[in-house]
Amino acid sequence: MSFFHFIEKSFHWEEGSIKEFEKLGSSLLLYVEFTSTASRCPYCHHKILHSKDYRDQKVLLGHWNTHPVSAIVHKRRFFCLCCHKTFYEKIPGVEHYQRRSNDIKNSIIQACSELASFKAIARSHGVSVSTVRITESLCLKRGIL
């Protein structure tokens, strides 16, 4: 099993979505593009969509052998011909408007429940202390912790 195949399967991405791989110092950078079309408009549920434009988004996926793994995702923006609204395609494994994968967030939540310091959690996950605090406070508010 190749490294690309392992990453695609762990994030439930379609096969062949990773186009390039680059090592920048101690970090790994993947270039990702999805080819399947969006099935329906999230507003009116109409099937006929038009691809309007593209945008690159950097997402922190996690760590592999203590190296941070990030992805530059080439996202498409769709235009619905029925309701005339635009929307971006969803990235599997990443919530809407987020720059970190769900695995990173779940790992931070798990570390917060083990009573580690915010600074230690931030250092081990490659995020800022304020990110750990915000994640923990949202979990407390929702009753997860």
Image (cartoon, helix red, strand yellow):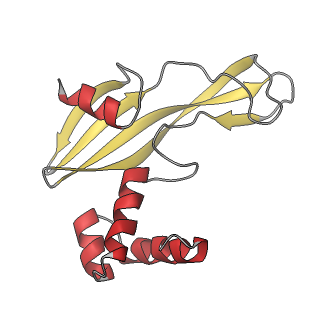
Q: Residue furthest right?
A: 83
Q: Is residue 109 above or below residue 47?
A: below
The residue located at (25%, 31%) in the rendering is 6
Of 58 and 105, which appears nearest the observer?
A: 105
- Is 22 on the left or on the right of 97, as rendered? left
Of 105 and 130, which appears nearest the observer?
A: 105
Of 79 and 64, which appears nearest the observer?
A: 64
Task: Tell me where residue 24 appears, x and y as whole percent.
Answer: 18, 45
- Is 109 on the left or on the right of 137, as rendered? left
Q: Is residue 40 above or below residue 10?
A: above
Q: Residue 71, located in which quarter of the rendered image? A: top left
The residue located at (71%, 19%) in the rendering is 50
- Is 50 on the left or on the right of 93, as rendered? right
Q: Is residue 67 above or below residue 33?
A: below
Quadrant of the snapshot with the N terminus: top left
Task: Tell me where residue 44 appears, x and y as whole percent.
Answer: 83, 31
Q: Residue 52, located in which quarter of the rendered image? A: top right
Task: Tell me where residue 78 appears, x and y as whole percent.
Answer: 67, 28
Of 45 and 25, which appears nearest the observer?
A: 45
The residue located at (41%, 29%) in the rendering is 13
The residue located at (34%, 19%) in the rendering is 16
